[in-house]
């Protein structure tokens, strides 16, 4: 995903934990709706910083279905989700948004003239207004409930494969029954010393062709199927695995000799810290006034999947319209007393000084 981002936009910021940045608007969430909000704010000469917990822009489109075609984006009879994000990044680029990726917004504090936003990596941004485009919340891997798991994480337990070659010659346990588990079992079988696939049943929810290939490699002795088993424990000193304990529902135990565990149990989406900021919520969503995108906290707006109001349709196109509304509302907060004359983009074009941070 990092490579995807690099292809589409160069404005990632190297965060300096000691210096606070200042901007007009902080957008929380770099999904399709957050990205379009950068454009809409930019057209009103509002500069934006965008924060996302993922290490790539694109939200659900890139994290969950990058290659699926979308058919209900106005003007595109068909567009692959990742390409839509590429187009949105291009549309936002003239406004030079600063992207802070791989960090969750953990704190929102009101100041005398706006807000301070703080992230899990210590980035601090002062702003006049906040637009929350957080979708269903921050994404993170579903972590298996194993004692002492955190000691092994990022040493010998990984939730994604960043560099395939790092796993060459290793004894690898892959846990899960979806596309990631099956695809990586097939791919790593070529370079690993041994690949074991732990799944609670002998049915896989993955592309049939990939499952067929995995079974072929199993028959050839390149992959070992450990079914029907579930993870039950980890063994090894100082975060370095030597074995992965598994057991059946009937309590039959095995220890698999292993150097690496790759649990692929999908992504969890949680509202996370947003739930603690005093916003009015309804069923895990932020209640807004659809006429303004205003939340119950003055100066904080919410758009896209996370925003709720009667009749809300959770569609990308709905979020785009909400982004335009929120940008106009944020203008009134960021530029108090300045008149805003409604203009079509055909009349004003993309402002020549687009992107000059305020
Ligand atoms: C398989 C699938 C197919 C779909 N097909 C269609 C379709 O055909 N048409 C359509 O219109 N819609 C479709 N959707 C729905 C569409 O993807 C969503 O409506 C859209 O992604 C919502 O965009 P968003 O920007 O509001 O939120 P998201 O795309 O969910 O992005 C939100 C981002 O906010 C980040 N975030 C949340 N909280 C924080 C925080 N505290 N700090 C930092 N970052 C945070 C998250 O990490 C995430 O990246 C589909 C969805 C799925 C899963």
Image (cartoon, rainbow, N blue to C red):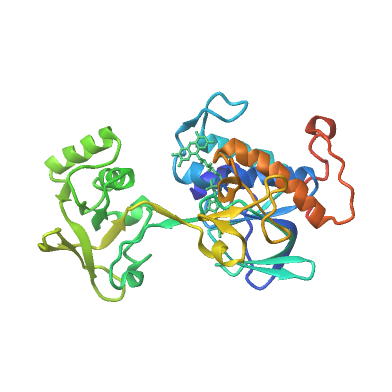
- Please indicate whether residue 112 sits to the left or right of residue 107 in the image: right
Q: Residue furthest top?
A: 77
Residue at image position (26%, 43%) is 186
Vertical placement of 174 versus 114: above or below?
Answer: above
- In percent of the image, x 52 and y 44: which residue is there? 4
Q: Is residue 197 above or below residue 18?
A: above
Which quarter of the image is occupied by the C terminus?
bottom right
Looking at the picture, how far across and down is residue 111, in whole percent?
74, 70
Image side of residue 217 versus residue 93, left or right: left
Residue 93 appears in the rendering: no
Q: Residue at x 51, y 36 (%)?
A: 81
Name the spot of residue 252 as percent of width and height, x first: 10, 62
* Quarter residue 106 falls in: bottom right
Please tell me how many numbered marks the rendered image carries.
Answer: 0
Tell me where residue 246 appears, x and y as whole percent.
18, 62
Quick one: 222 or 306, which is closer to the camera? Answer: 306
- Visible residue check, residue 331: yes
Q: For the view shown, which residue lies furthest in the front direction?
A: 310
Query: Residue at left 17%, top 45%?
Result: 202
Residue 54 percent across, percent down from the top left? 51, 54
């Amino acid at each position: 995903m990092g490579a995807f981002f690099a292809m589409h936009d160069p404005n990632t910021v190297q965060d300096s934990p000691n210096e606070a940045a200042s901007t007009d608007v902080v957008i929380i969430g770099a999904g399709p709706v957050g990205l379009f909000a950068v454009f809409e704010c930019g057209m009103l000469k509002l500069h934006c910083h965008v924060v996302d917990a993922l290490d790539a822009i694109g939200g659900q489109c890139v994290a969950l279905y990058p290659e699926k075609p979308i058919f209900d984006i106005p003007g595109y009879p068909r567009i692959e989700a990742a390409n839509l994000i590429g187009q949105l990044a291009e549309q936002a680029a003239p406004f030079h948004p600063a992207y802070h990726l791989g960090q969750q917004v953990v704190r929102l504090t009101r100041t005398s003239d706006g807000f301070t936003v703080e992230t899990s990596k210590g980035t601090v941004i002062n702003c006049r207004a906040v637009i929350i485009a957080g979708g269903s919340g921050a994404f993170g891997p579903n972590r298996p409930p194993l004692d002492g798991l955190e000691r092994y994480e990022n040493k010998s337990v990984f939730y994604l494969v960043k560099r395939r070659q790092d796993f060459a010659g290793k004894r690898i346990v892959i846990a899960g029954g979806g596309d990631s588990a099956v695809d990586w079992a097939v791919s790593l079988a070529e370079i690993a010393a041994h690949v074991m696939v732990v799944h609670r049943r002998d049915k896989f929810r993955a592309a049939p062709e990939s499952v067929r290939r995995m079974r072929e490699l199993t028959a050839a002795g390149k992959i070992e199927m450990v079914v029907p088993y579930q993870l039950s424990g980890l063994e090894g000193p100082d975060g370095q695995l030597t074995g992965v304990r598994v057991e059946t529902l009937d309590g039959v135990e095995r220890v698999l000799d292993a150097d690496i565990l790759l649990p692929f149990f999908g992504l969890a989406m949680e509202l996370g810290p947003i739930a603690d900021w005093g916003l009015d919520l309804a069923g895990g969503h932020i209640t807004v006034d659809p006429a303004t995108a205003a939340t119950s906290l003055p100066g904080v707006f919410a758009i896209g999947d996370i925003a709720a109001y009667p009749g809300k349709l959770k569609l990308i196109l709905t979020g785009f319209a909400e982004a335009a509304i929120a940008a106009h509302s944020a203008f009134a907060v960021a530029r108090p007393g300045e008149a805003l004359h409604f203009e079509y983009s055909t009349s004003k074009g993309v402002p020549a000084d687009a992107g000059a941070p305020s």
